[in-house]
């Protein structure tokens, strides 16, 4: 099978390896391309930009199936030019008998600027792939084309399943522990990591950690800078550092894995009523379990299949408190969760899902019925 993935200058080659600072490119371009190659297929990445000549681009698309990856950028001029190029390329690919697959994982269907492109591409593509059942149900409102759900593979290192519980302090005297549990650090180490667009929901959840009066807390925040996080941490620490101390770490993949290895637990609050966030996948929860860390997360629909391996709810402090009071039960959940994600979210498992979907797309002539 010959497959080409289209990206938009989001992937860089470093020492012969593909890299990207964009999670969507790592999970849904680099990983499936490399996975299909391991499975013996001819998979290639082609990147296009705003100045590329369409006739030259189409000559590079010598494959049975062409997959168009996520297109989203705050630069409206760039988005407009690239979306127009994509429409033309799809027409030319169809004229030459090639199949087109669109991979969509963002809900911009009603956006005043991006919406027209999203509605158009689901009608033009022969099939659509997305990462969650919630998103597939939404897409089905705009197309009769087949829709297939394929999740994101884990990419981080496997860690030992553990939950390090620090000494608990008196409710009214934070400098004096009531017990020393194996000589552990006297601060509870928590971590939040994610895209800066998700910082607001974490920022709103931070004050709730002050309800954990029995423990002194260190919360490491791993995200991009220049979104107000540094200023928030400084202001919060000026008032609450004795009880709950925030540390900002600029995002990199290595910083993320290091932060997970240091933490006792991972915090993943979610947006309760944001339709754009409701369709998101479970990659942060999957990565936390992969690292061997107990996660306290919000009630995102994509998390439900992992509910037995973590704590889901609206109050982060309640979830953290439960884990601290039930450390062995929490650790057992993580251990079982690690085994589950190793099977369900491994790069090989996800690659085989792509292989099956693309093979089906390439051999079926009537692509008008949704499949889930």
Image (tube, rainbow, N blue to C red):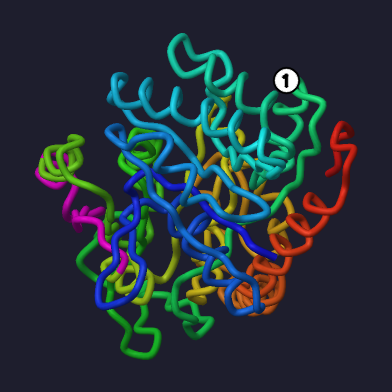
Image: 292 above or below 89: below
Quarter of the rendering occupied by the C terminus? top right
Nearer to me, 178 or 360: 360
Residue at image x 44%, y 28%?
85
Residue at image x 70%, y 73%?
340
Image: 151 above or below 225: below
Residue at image x 39%, y 42%?
56
Q: Residue furthest bottom?
A: 182
Residue at image x 26%, y 62%?
252
Inspect this view and state whether residue 188 appears.
no
Residue 358 placement (x, y as % from top left): 73, 56
Q: Residue furthest top?
A: 112
In the picture, measured across the screen, residue 192 lies left or right of residue 357, that is left
Residue, disc 1:
142
Number of numbered discs overlaid on the protein picture: 1
In the picture, measured across the screen, residue 85 lies left or right of residue 117, that is left
Nearer to me, 273 or 121: 121
Nearer to me, 38 or 330: 38
Inspect this view and state whether residue 230 appears.
yes
């Amino acid at each position: 099978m010959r497959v080409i993935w289209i990206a938009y200058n989001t992937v860089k080659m470093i020492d012969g390896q593909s890299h990207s600072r964009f999670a969507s490119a790592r999970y849904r371009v680099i990983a499936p391309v490399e996975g299909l190659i391991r499975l013996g297929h001819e998979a290639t990445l082609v990147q296009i930009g705003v100045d590329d000549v369409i006739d030259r681009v189409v000559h590079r698309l010598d494959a049975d199936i062409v997959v168009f990856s996520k297109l989203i950028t705050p630069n409206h001029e760039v988005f407009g030019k690239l979306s127009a190029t994509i429409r033309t390329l799809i027409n030319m690919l169809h004229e030459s008998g090639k199949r087109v697959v669109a991979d969509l994982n963002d809900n911009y269907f009603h956006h005043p600027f991006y919406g027209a492109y999203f509605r158009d591409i689901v009608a033009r593509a022969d099939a659509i792939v997305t990462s969650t059942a919630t998103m597939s149900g939404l897409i089905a409102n705009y197309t009769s084309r087949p829709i297939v759900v394929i999740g994101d593979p884990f990419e981080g290192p496997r860690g030992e399943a553990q939950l390090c519980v620090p000494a608990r302090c008196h409710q009214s005297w934070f400098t004096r522990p009531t017990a020393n549990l194996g000589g552990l650090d006297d601060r509870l180490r928590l971590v939040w990591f994610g895209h800066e667009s998700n910082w607001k929901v974490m920022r709103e959840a931070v004050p709730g950690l002050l309800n954990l009066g029995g423990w002194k807390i260190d919360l490491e925040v791993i995200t991009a800078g220049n979104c107000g996080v540094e200023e928030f941490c400084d202001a919060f620490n000026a008032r609450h550092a004795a009880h709950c101390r925030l540390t900002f770490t600029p995002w990199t993949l290595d910083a993320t894995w290091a932060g997970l290895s240091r933490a006792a637990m991972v915090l993943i609050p979610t947006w309760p009523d944001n339709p754009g966030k409701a369709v998101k996948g479970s990659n942060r929860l999957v990565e936390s379990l992969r690292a061997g860390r107990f996660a306290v997360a919000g009630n995102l629909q994509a998390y439900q299949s992992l509910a037995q391996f973590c704590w889901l709810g609206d109050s982060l402090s309640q979830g953290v408190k439960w884990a601290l009071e039930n450390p062995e039960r929490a650790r057992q959940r993580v251990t079982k969760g690690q085994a589950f994600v190793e099977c369900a979210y491994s790069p090989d498992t996800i690659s085989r899902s792509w292989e099956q979907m693309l093979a089906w797309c390439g051999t079926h002539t009537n692509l008008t019925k949704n499949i889930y």
